[in-house]
Amino acid sequence: MKYLKFCLSVAACLTAVASPWWSASAFALRTLEQGAKAPDLELSGVNVEGAKLSSLVGAKGVVVIYWATWSSRSPGILQFAEKELRKYEALGMNVVAVNADHEEMKPGDLQAVRDKVKELGLAMPVFHDRGLEGYNALGIISTPTTLILDNTLTLLEAYPGFPSIAKTDLPEKIDAVLGIVREKRPEKAQYLLDHKPGNHALQYYNLGKRLFLTARSPSGELRGGVPQSAIDRLDEAIRRDPDFFRPYLLKAIIYHAAKERALRDSALDNIRKREFQEPYEHRVLALGYLEMGMDDNASDHLKALLSLTAGDPAGLFGQTVLSGRRKDAAGAKKSAQALFANPKTKEVLGEDPAALFTPEGAVKPGAERAVRDTLERLLEIEKKGQGMIRPDAPVTSADVNRVAP
């Protein structure tokens, strides 16, 4: 089963800026485009009788949640939909769930789905996608994924995953479809509020980062190979909070800079085993993979990020860099124009994008170093007035307390 397992970098989650160039829904599915008609799927019943998708549509449309028992985010969105989204049924927008566990479902698999539905207390209609016919026809990338279809089965919105912002995003999107005006939510780094590393892990991460930067030359080369003192601090951060993903990524970046590919890949294996769905995570990992020249991985994370926040300046910056590397002139121009049009770009990048890229999205002659510096600034691994720490210095309580988040 294909599903997203990602990670990423920047300082805060930003509200998407509307852009004619980048629609979030355009990144959520591989096949079905926004404005296209979904196939009228024949669905097998789980807690109701089987039905065709068209028979499940309300007066205004239908919300379809694709989910799986193996997806850690699926229970959250299903319970949220049961409690909050089903309120829209009174306004003509029905809500259904479609399971996509496996292409071939054995009796035990089907029972596991029924057990999960009962465990979660779902009263909404739940179906199974036989042979993953709809999953493949729609081109679903991430599980869960929420589709908002009108009463002709035309795709209005597609929303992948269930990040922390989804509890606001999804009702906002349904409201927009129904013509309901609501006050715009304030911008805030919700991820950082909800996922603050525990047990001083962030401080040890910052200590490891400073030691890495101390060992690195201005050109980005590591003097003397792998700075083991930095790795030791990052390992301590991981020990203190194994769920904190950034030490794994920074270890990979360090090993990559030291040309230790096997160690880099080992560090990244710890990331690939996990399921990431927050914009912040996708942002950090997309940029981290770009830093290491792992463009296919970066592309996956950028798609995930821009499917959630289409106007994200860091994501558009990354997409412009990636398109340029891949000699995709049309893609580079498209992302660069969206980047230039975004009023938050200069604030987020710390640099005027017009100083980095031409209107066609190519890196300006002589701006290669500035582009690299911008990437590292977004990753928060730039060298700036850090103060020096001896690589062999022991960590004291004062060190931990003064390296604040």
Image (cartoon, rainbow, N blue to C red):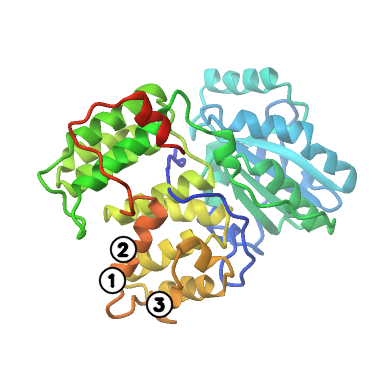
Residue linked to disc 3? 355
Q: Is residue 308 left or right of residue 177?
A: left
Residue shown at 33% from the left, 62% from the top: 373
User: Which residue is identified by label 2?
Assistant: 372
> Could you say whether the residue bearing mark 2 is in a helix, strand or loop?
helix
Quote the CA–CA distance across marks 1 and 3.
11 Å
Q: Position of residue 195 (x, y in %)?
A: 53, 33
Classify 150 as above or below 5: below
Element assignment for label 3: helix
Instruction: Give amino acid for label 3.
Output: Ala
Q: Nearer the viewer, residue 284 or 306?
A: 284
Amino acid beneath label 2: Arg
- Residue 273: x and y in percent read 38, 32
Mark before the other along the chain sequence, 1 or 3: 3
Q: Are marks 2 and 1 in contact (CB under 8 Å)?
A: yes
Residue position for label 1 = 368
